[in-house]
Image (cartoon, helix red, strand yellow):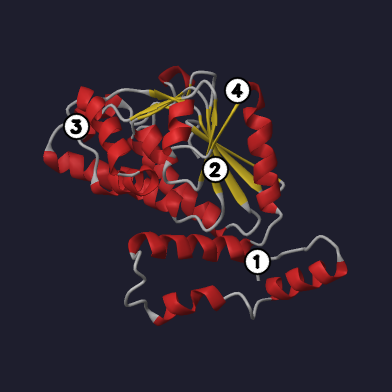
């Protein structure tokens, strides 16, 4: 694993840290590829029950794509397609992690960093956070994948405002439009996020996995038309599992359940 992206795993929680504080945790081309591989590893690791993404230092969650990459990877259409494949692949891989994912946001969360956060399930922001996608200052475009996540999360109007104005908004405005889930004082950000992650790590992993699949099905097919047999049966997939039996027994016996993901 690159020193630019650090991973710590404790008590079922994996914390992934963007570790380029001098560059406001901008993510370069290799970083997007690393995140793809990392997401696959975390998805397969049964010991991981929740994943937290954070930025090193005190300035930023992430300033997004490293502009130094533009000269090599975004200098023409062919290279831009190659870069987009790495970037969108990372976001898709993060979105596909079958476990709860949290962005722990402080300071700047802009451009690709803001778009990255929309690929996680929950976004907890410190009250000093700033958000935006100022692509109009660089004369570049957001791709379909990242724009669709924004529209699904906050709607077309706020998405248009962020992309067309190139302005940054504060944490209160981000909460108002639904870009973040919660806003907490900066001093409480880590403890608040750690507590949430710890609580979710104790919950049923199969429920988490299938809930995320159900949500994606609804987003892609709001009318639930022409569902496949697998999609139609998904809400019932858990009833023959050991975890369902354990959850039911624990409730009756008034004890904490011990879920295994089986």
- Residue topped by disc 4: 186
**Residue 61 appearing in the image:** no
Residues at circles 2 and 4 in contact by the CB criterion of under 8 Å: no
The residue sitting at 67% across, 38% down in the picture is 194
Q: Is mark 3 on a helix, strand or loop?
A: loop
In the rendered view, tell whether residue 74 sits above or below residue 169: below
Which circle's residue, 1 or 3, is located before the other in the chain?
3
- Residue topped by disc 1: 261
Q: What element carries label 2?
A: strand
Which circle's residue, 3 or 2, is located before the other in the chain?
2
Tell me how far mark 1 sits from mark 4, CA to CA. 34 Å
- Residue topped by disc 3: 140
- Residue topped by disc 2: 102
Between 50 and 166, the residue placed more toward the observer is 166
Crowd rating for badge 2 (residues with CA inside 10 Å; few <14, some 14–19, many 20+): many
Q: Nearer the viewer, mark 3 or mark 4?
A: 4
Residues at circles 1 and 4 in contact by the CB criterion of under 8 Å: no
Residues at circles 1 and 3 in contact by the CB criterion of under 8 Å: no
Crowd rating for badge 4 (residues with CA inside 10 Å; few <14, some 14–19, many 20+): some
Between 173 and 70, the residue placed more toward the observer is 173
Tell me how far mark 2 sits from mark 4, CA to CA. 16 Å
Q: Nearer the viewer, mark 2 or mark 4?
A: 4
Residues at circles 3 and 4 in contact by the CB criterion of under 8 Å: no
The residue sitting at 41% across, 20% down in the picture is 23
Tell me how far mark 1 sits from mark 3, CA to CA. 43 Å
Horizontal and vertical percent position of residue 76: 12, 35
Which circle's residue, 3 or 4, is located before the other in the chain?
3
Disc number placed over residue 62 in the picture, else none: none
**Residue 184 appearing in the image:** yes
Q: Which of marks 1 and 2 is in front?
A: 2
Crowd rating for badge 1 (residues with CA inside 10 Å; few <14, some 14–19, many 20+): some
Tell me how far mark 3 sits from mark 2, CA to CA. 28 Å
């Amino acid at each position: 694993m690159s020193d630019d992206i650090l991973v710590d795993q404790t008590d079922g929680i994996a914390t992934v840290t963007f570790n380029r504080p001098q560059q406001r945790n901008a993510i370069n081309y290799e970083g997007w590829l690393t995140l793809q591989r990392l997401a696959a590893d975390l998805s397969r690791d049964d010991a991981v029950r929740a994943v937290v993404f954070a930025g090193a230092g005190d300035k930023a969650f992430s300033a997004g794509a490293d502009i130094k990459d533009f000269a090599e990877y975004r200098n023409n259409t062919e290279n831009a397609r190659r870069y987009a494949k790495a970037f969108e692949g990372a976001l898709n891989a993060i979105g596909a992690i079958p476990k709860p994912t949290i962005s722990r946001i402080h300071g700047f969360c802009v451009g690709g960093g803001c778009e990255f956060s929309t690929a996680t399930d929950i976004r907890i922001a410190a009250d000093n956070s700033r958000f935006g996608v100022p692509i109009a200052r660089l004369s570049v475009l957001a791709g379909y994948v990242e724009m669709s996540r924004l529209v699904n999360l906050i709607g077309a109007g706020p998405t248009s405002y962020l992309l067309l104005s190139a302005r940054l908004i504060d944490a209160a405005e981000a909460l108002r439009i639904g870009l973040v889930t919660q806003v907490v004082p900066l001093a409480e950000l880590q403890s608040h996020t750690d507590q949430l992650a710890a609580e979710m790590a104790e919950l049923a992993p199969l429920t988490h996995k299938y809930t995320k699949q159900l949500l994606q099905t609804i987003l892609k097919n709001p009318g639930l038309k022409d569902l496949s047999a697998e999609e139609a049966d998904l809400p019932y997939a858990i009833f023959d599992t050991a975890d369902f039996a354990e959850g039911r027994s624990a409730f009756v016996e008034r004890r904490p359940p011990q879920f295994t993901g089986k």
